[in-house]
Amino acid sequence: MSLIETFKNIIIVDFLRYFIPASIGFLLFWILFKKRLQHRFIQKTRPKIARLWAEFKYSMSTVFIFAGVGLGVVTAKKYGVFHIYESIATFGWVYFFASLFFMILFHDFYFYWTHRWMHHPKIFKHVHLVHHLSTNPSPWAAYSFHPIEAFIQALVLPILLFMLPLHNLVIFIFLIYMITRNVWGHLGYELLPKKFINFKWLNWHTTTTHHSMHHQYSSCNFGLYFTWWDNWMKTTHKKYRESFEEITSRPNKDTN
């Protein structure tokens, strides 16, 4: 298969990886159950249609950039730069799950610190501002990045491949987990129960409220999957818990 054909295929796969979960999230919560779940909509107003289209258009540029990095990974694999193995027996099941766990932890670390860096005043307006034009994001904002930011975020996979051998299935699960959590963070609706914030075995996961507050206030809640780095670096918004409890305590006024 030629590089052009490979690139086309990677574009299609990455487009679907973005479009399917984003469209499902938008269809379910912004259209079908919009009225029924209105009390769980985090912010007071909804973004205009023009903003939704802008999120989608920037996401299309991100698809091409992610695909370009993906093509680089495929090419590097052919020359033995990366070790992507196919048989689980090569390293066993323990390594299989340990590598997936490590990928998620490393990505959370990588995202937090690159995200903090992009909020530096000299960097923000040139790179990260594009994403923050969505002060009240929708699921379509999951890929809505400036091209430089898209490239920085895409680098996490080749960095991981430099660090350790990865199974094809582990990479697939990681990429699906990544986009699912990203769409969840930009969903606009808080779907978790009120008690979640007090459940010590789960409340270290970020919530939609957690990331929505980042879009509202900008200088807080930088984490991706977990709240650990925000808590350790004291960048969690001081009213995060209060906001989560307020949103999840709202009465459902829809009687239909």
Image (cartoon, rainbow, N blue to C red):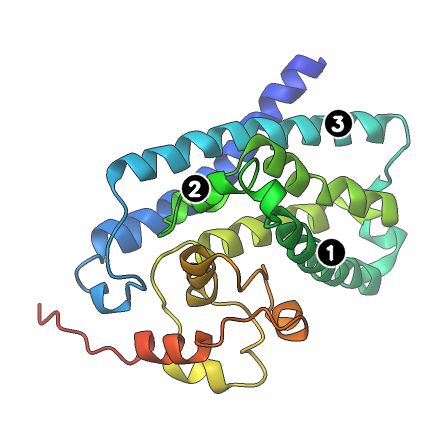
The residue most toward the front is 122
Q: Which residue is located at x 59 percent, y 70 percent?
A: 227
Q: Is residue 23 left or right of residue 235?
A: left
Q: Which quarter of the image is occupied by the N terminus?
A: top right
Question: To which residue does mark 1 refer?
Answer: 103
Quick one: SS at disc 1? Answer: helix
Q: Is residue 14 above or below residue 230?
A: above
Q: Position of residue 236 (x, y in %)?
A: 55, 71
Tag nearer the camera, 1 or 2: 1
Quick one: SS at disc 3? Answer: helix
Q: Which residue is located at x 54 percent, y 31 percent?
A: 63
Q: Position of residue 75 (x, y in %)?
A: 79, 25
Q: Which residue is located at x 86 percent, y 37 percent?
A: 82
Cα separation, mark 3 vs mark 2, equals 24 Å
Cα separation, mark 3 vs mark 1, equals 19 Å
3 and 2 marks in contact (CB < 8 Å): no
Question: To which residue does mark 2 refer?
Answer: 20
Label 2 Cα neighbours within 10 Å, binned few <14 / some 14-19 / many ≥20: few
Q: Is residue 249 above or below residue 32?
A: below
- Three-letter code, disc 3: Gly
Q: Position of residue 169 (x, y in %)?
A: 70, 48
Q: Is residue 216 visible?
A: yes
Q: Is residue 39 above or below residue 201?
A: above
Q: Which quarter of the image is occupied by the C terminus?
A: bottom left
Q: Please identify the quarter of the rendering in which residue 112 is found.
A: bottom right
Q: Earlier in the sequence, mark 1 or mark 2?
A: 2
Question: To which residue does mark 3 refer?
Answer: 72
Q: Which residue is located at x 60 percent, y 38 percent?
A: 149
Q: Is residue 86 visible?
A: no
- Three-letter code, disc 1: Met
Cα separation, mark 1 vs mark 2, equals 23 Å
The tag on residue 23 is: none
